[in-house]
Image: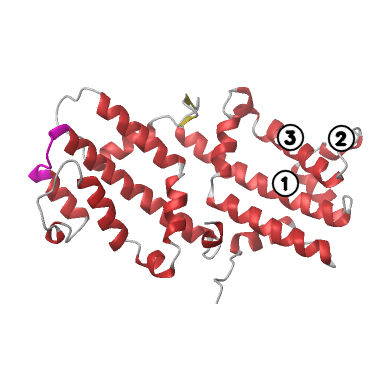
Amino acid sequence: MRELSLRVPWRTLERECESLVQWRAFALWVQWIAEAEHSVPAWLQSVIEGKCEGFLQTRAHPLRAETVAHEVNEWIENHYFESAQSGGWFPAVLHHAGQCPKLEQIRRYMARCREGVRTGAYPSFDEWLQQARASRFWVDDSEVPVEPAQLGVAVGRYVDWEAFVFWARLVVSAANGIPGILAETLGERCPNFLAALQRKSPTCESYAMWFWEELSAWVEDHEFASAKQNSWLDALRNFANRHVRTERIVAYWVECDTAWRKSPPPQYPSFADWIAQADDFVVPAEG
C-alpha cells in the first residue's frame, strides 16, 4: 500500500482522502435514517439523488434500508474518484481514509445516534456532519480530553516538528556529529537544547539515534507541554503518525539516509529546502 501512496503527491492523496471521508459520512447519515425508518423514505431518496445525480436511475430494484448505504458508497467510488481509479492508486485512498481519525470520529457519532432517542425532524446532512465533527475523538476506548479543532491544529504542528527532528537526525548521522548548519538551526528553533545535550552522555551505541531520542523528547516537553500535562500526547502521536504527510516524510528520510550513507552531500540542505523536497517526493510507478 505504501508504494501506491508514494506514487502521487501527498497533498493530492490527502485531498482525495478528505473527499472520501466526507462521502463516507454521507452514507453513514443515510444509513442511520434508513435504519431508523426501516425504509428509504422518498425525501431521503431525493436527497441522495441531489448529491449523486443519476444514482436512482441506475438502480434495478427498489432501495432497501439494509443495503442503501453500501449502494451509495459503491456508486460514489465509481463516479467521484475517476483519477485515482484510472491511475491505479484508489486502494491507497481507501486505506488512508479507512484509518483516518476523522472517519472514526464520525462512525462513533453515528453509533451514538443509533442508540439515542430522536425527537423532532432529522438534521440535514450538513447539520449532522457539523455535530459529528464537534464530537470528541477517541483512542483505544478512551475519550481524548481536548476539543477536536485544537487537536487538529496540534497534529499539523506535530508533523512539522517531527519532520524537523528527522532532518536533524539525518544530518547528524551523515556528519557523525553536529555541523554548523544544524547547530545554528537548533539555536534558533530549540534554545538551550545543545547546552543541555552537552551535559549528558550518550545512552546507546548510535550517537545519531541517541540525538534523535533526545531532540524528540525536548520537542514534546517544550512544544507540546499542554498535551503532555493534560494526557493527550499519546493521542497526538497516534494521529500524527497516521497522517499522509508523515508517511511521505519518513519515506524521503529513508531515501536520503540510504543515499547519504553511500555518498554524503557536499553541502547539507537547510531544513526549509529539505522539507520542501520531502513534500514534493514521489516514487514513479514501475514500467
Quadrant in which the C terminus appears = bottom right
Furthest residue in direction bottom, as rendered: 287
- Say whether disc 1 or disc 2 marks the residue closer to the N-terminus: 1
Q: Dot 2 lies on which element?
A: loop
Amino acid at the residue labelled 2: Thr
Report the residue marked by disc 1: 165
Per the model, the C-alpha gap separating discs 1 and 2 is 18 Å
Q: Are marks 3 and 1 in contact (CB under 8 Å)?
A: no
What residue do we see at 34% from left, 48% from top? Answer: 22
Q: Position of residue 286 (x, y in %)?
A: 56, 73
Amino acid at the residue labelled 3: Ala
Residue extent of the magenta highlight: 36-43
- Say whether disc 2 or disc 3 marks the residue closer to the N-terminus: 2
Q: Which mark is residue 203?
A: 2
Q: Which mark is residue 217?
A: 3
Q: Position of residue 172 (x, y in %)?
A: 83, 51
Per the model, the C-alpha gap separating discs 3 and 1 is 10 Å
Say whether residue 202 is left or right of residue 167: right
What residue do we see at 13% from left, 34% from top? Answer: 37
Coloration mode: secondary structure
- Say whether disc 3 or disc 1 marks the residue closer to the N-terminus: 1
Instruction: Judge by depth and name the residue closer to the eye, 273 or 53.
Output: 53
Closer to viewer: mark 1 or mark 2? 2
